[in-house]
Image (spheres, rainbow, N blue to C red):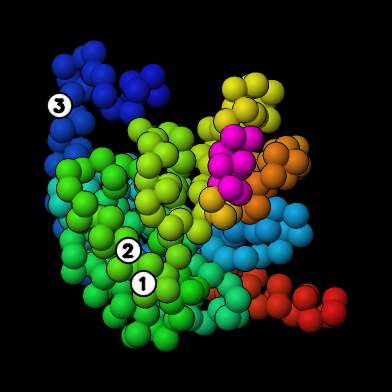
């Protein structure tokens, strides 16, 4: 399918529409059993301090390898799982797995887990988080939940209350893909985020010298600082991009330049090696 199709929103040709509907239906059926069949796993992408480039944690990213269709991108199946109301059980599996796996890392290495709006609109989610921590032995301050602005778009204050109770557990929150949704600064003053993640599109724009992108990063960094929040630049792919976002004042960086999402064993090795390096340097 053409990339110009606008994320699947525009379909010019009728036959394409049929193919897409059929593919969606097949994927949805497959998604219903993917977790039970052991087809899902997590990959962990390093997040590092922008200045020292020391590892601070990993973001857990969901991976699905279907025995027949092969690897399917979360950018494709997560929205589908959300629409089909399948994201809550999958998300619970992600959370429990990430906490269990991260509990094996050095105690100053955090794990960030992406959470969908559906999960946050379920009051029972607080108990799920508490139980994932208790069962894994991971301390609450090592868990960070990444939420997007879309969580605040639904009616009512249910999600805000769930977020507050999660904060009360000692878990951190970060605002993912900042600037790509319908941003309202009100959320930032009402919810205690530890960090704001600046979307890759701004990082890319800034490195190409797009003045608006640079201005936006500068403004977000200033805003975050004045609210006592950190900023993470997403999708840093080159040394030049790293230098750029560091100069703009971003506190943390994440991207292919520092590491691709890794299998759990490699993530653990990297975390341990870093500790060894620090000890050797001291
Ligand atoms: P995200 O949370 O913004 O995650 C960052 C995405 O950017 C990841 O894509 C990551 O692999 C990719 N990325 C990181 N560094 C670079 C880079 O330097 N260049 C480029 N081009 N890309 C980079 P991924 O793993 O395909 O995930 C896509 C999205 O799917 C995530 O975006 C997140 O919104 C969603 N997702 C992934 N795992 C989960 C999950 O467990 N639960 C939920 N609800 N959503 C998830
Ligand atoms: Mg994320
Ligand atoms: Mg992100
Ligand atoms: Mg993003």
Name the foreground residue: 63 vs 231.
Answer: 231
Q: Is residue 183 left or right of residue 247?
A: left
Tell me the residue at 60%/58% (across/down): 47
Vertical position of residue 147 compared to residue 19: above or below: below
Rate crowding at label 3 as few (under 14), some (14 to 19) or many (20 or more) other CA atoms within 10 Å. Answer: few
The answer to whether residue 26 shows anywhere in this view is no
Q: What is the distance, in whole Å, between disc 3 and disc 1 at their CAs?
A: 47 Å
Q: What is the CA distance from the residue labelled 2 to the residue labelled 3? A: 43 Å
Residue 282's label in the rendered image is none
Q: Secondary structure under badge 1?
A: helix
Task: Quickly name the residue at label 3.
Answer: 18
Per the image, is 234 magenta?
Answer: no
In the rendered structure, are the residues bearing label 1 and label 2 in contact, judged by CB atoms less than 8 Å apart?
A: yes
Would residue 125 be visible to someone looking at this image? yes
**Residue 107 image point, x, y percent:** 58, 81
Q: Where does the magenta region start and end?
A: 217-226
Question: What secondary structure predominates along the stretch shown in magenta?
Answer: helix
Please name whichever residue, 207 or 247, is drawn nearer the observer in this view of the structure.
Answer: 247
Q: Residue at x 24, y 75 (%)?
A: 127
Residue linked to disc 1: 168
Q: Position of residue 119 (x, y in %)?
A: 24, 58
Q: Are marks 2 and 3 in contact (CB under 8 Å)?
A: no
> Which labelled disc corresponds to residue 164?
2
| Label 2 CA crowd tier, 10 Å (few <14, some 14–19, many 20+) | some
């Amino acid at each position: 399918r053409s990339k110009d199709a606008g994320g699947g929103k525009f379909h010019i040709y009728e036959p394409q529409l049929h193919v897409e509907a059929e593919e969606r239906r097949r994927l949805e059926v497959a998604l219903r059993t993917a977790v039970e069949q052991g087809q899902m796993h997590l990959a962990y992408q390093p997040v590092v301090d922008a200045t020292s480039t020391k590892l601070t944690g990993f973001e857990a990213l969901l991976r699905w390898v279907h025995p027949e269709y092969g690897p399917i991108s979360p950018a494709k199946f997560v929205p589908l799982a959300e629409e089909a109301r399948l994201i809550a059980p999958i998300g619970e599996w992600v959370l429990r797995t990430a906490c269990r796996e991260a509990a094996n890392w050095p105690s100053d290495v955090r794990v960030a887990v992406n959470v969908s709006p559906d999960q946050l609109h379920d009051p029972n989610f607080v108990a799920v988080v508490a139980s994932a921590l208790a069962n894994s032995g991971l301390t609450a301050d090592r868990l960070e939940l990444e939420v997007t602005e879309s969580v605040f778009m639904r009616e009512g204050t249910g999600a805000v209350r769930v977020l507050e109770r999660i904060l009360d557990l000692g878990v951190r929150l970060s605002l993912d893909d900042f600037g790509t949704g319908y941003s309202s600064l009100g959320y930032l003053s009402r919810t205690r985020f530890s960090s704001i993640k600046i979307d890759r599109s701004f990082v890319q724009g800034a490195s190409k010298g797009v003045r608006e992108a640079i201005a936006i990063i500068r403004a977000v960094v200033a805003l975050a600082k004045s609210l006592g929040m950190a900023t993470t630049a997403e999708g840093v792919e080159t040394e030049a991009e790293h230098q750029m976002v560091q100069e703009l004042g971003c506190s943390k960086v994440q991207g292919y330049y520092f590491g691709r999402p890794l299998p759990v064993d490699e993530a653990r090795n990297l975390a341990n090696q870093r500790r060894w390096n620090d000890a050797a340097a001291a």
